[in-house]
Image (cartoon, rainbow, N blue to C red):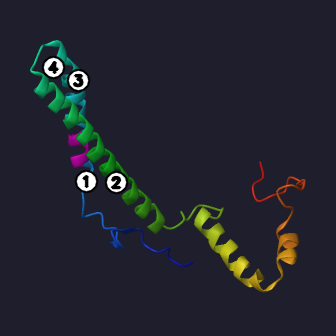
């Protein structure tokens, strides 16, 4: 089984040690929750307009930063899961193994004309299926 390419971030392989961690993200969420509660209360309490507007802009910027952090952390999780092997007790193939098999079959069938490949792979989207497709329930 070939190892998939590492997930790239800014042109380099993604490394968990670089970039924000889960603690940074949690801190951002705590500050964001406080700012979201404090912003409307600042209007009710009659704070200066420039301060309320500043809090509102702070909430918007913090939403952007927290959103980018969660995207980064999700990419780390995806990179970690891609690097793991199939559990030893699993009798079924993983999605990656199925894709590798399909790619290998596609490259060997690449010499055949398109009509022959369509017949070999089964019915098209408009043709009825016998229910024995790749997923059986």
Image spot of residue 50 (x, y percent): 11, 27
Q: Which quadrant is the N terminus positioned in?
A: bottom right
Task: State if disc 2 and disc 4 touch (CB < 8 Å).
Answer: no
Q: Secondary structure at mark 4?
A: helix
Q: CA distance from mark 4 to mark 2?
A: 33 Å
Please provide percent x and percent y for residue 112.
82, 83
Instruction: Return the residue at label 1.
Output: 21
The residue identified by callout 4 is 42
- First in sequence: mark 1 or mark 2? 1
Which residue carries the number 2 mark? 73
- Residue range in magenta is 23-28
| Foreground label between 3 and 1 | 3
Q: Is residue 79 above or below residue 55?
A: below
Query: 24 or 60, which is in the foreground?
Result: 60
Horizontal arrangement in the rendering, residue 9 relative to residue 83 (left or right): left
Front tag of 2 and 3 = 3
């Amino acid at each position: 089984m070939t190892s998939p390419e590492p997930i790239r971030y800014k042109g380099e392989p993604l490394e968990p040690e670089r970039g924000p961690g889960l603690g940074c993200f949690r801190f951002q969420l705590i500050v964001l929750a406080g700012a979201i509660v404090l912003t409307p209360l600042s209007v009710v309490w009659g704070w200066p307009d420039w301060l309320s507007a500043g809090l509102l802009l702070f909430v918007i910027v913090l939403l952007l930063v927290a959103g980018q952090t969660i995207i980064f952390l999700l990419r780390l999780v995806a990179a970690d899961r891609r690097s793991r092997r199939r559990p030893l007790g699993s009798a079924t193939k993983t999605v990656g193994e199925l894709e590798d098999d399909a790619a290998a079959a596609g490259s060997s069938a690449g010499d055949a004309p398109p009509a022959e490949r369509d017949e070999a792979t089964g019915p098209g989207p408009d043709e009825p299926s016998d229910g024995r497709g790749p997923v059986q329930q």
